[in-house]
Image (spheres, rainbow, N blue to C red):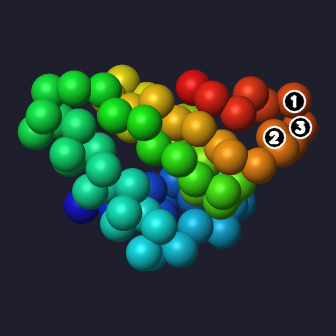
Amino acid sequence: MQARSVLRKGVAINRNVGSADALIASCCRELALELKARVVFYTADWGLYTVLRQIDSFTSVMTLRFILLPKNGIPAET
């Protein structure tokens, strides 16, 4: 269900997010919740990074890091 929410958010803000990427991010979120610890999620996918930055359920339990050069003045870490 969470992966589907990521895909829908991607469509809503016109970002290309693949279903496998959404599933991996959602599994990482579930791991963080299960461990009750903040985890770091590294990605080189700008579309996925910008989508996850806008979803509170991800930013509350994960530190997001974009490993390439950031774009549009958006920081590479949240």
Q: Residue at x 10, y 39 (%)?
A: 34
Expressed as whole percent of the image width and height from the top left, the position of residue 32 reads: 23, 37
Which residue in the protein does label 2 denote? 70
Asked if residue 28 lies left or right of residue 8, the reply is left
Which residue in the protein does label 3 denote? 72
Badge 3 vs badge 1, beta-carbon distance below 8 Å: yes
- Depth check: 60 or 28 in front? 28
The CA distance from mark 3 to mark 1 is 4 Å
Query: Taking 14 as reference, is 52 above or below it?
Result: above
Query: Taking 61 as reference, is 1 above or below it?
Result: below
Pointer 2 local density, CA inside 10 Å: few below 14, some 14–19, many at least 20: some
Residue 73 image-quadrant placement: top right
Amino acid type at mark 3: Asn
- Depth check: 39 or 30 in front? 39
Badge 1 vs badge 2, beta-carbon distance below 8 Å: yes
Badge 2 vs badge 3, beta-carbon distance below 8 Å: yes
The numbered dot on residue 73 is 1
The CA distance from mark 2 to mark 3 is 7 Å
Q: Secondary structure at mark 3?
A: loop
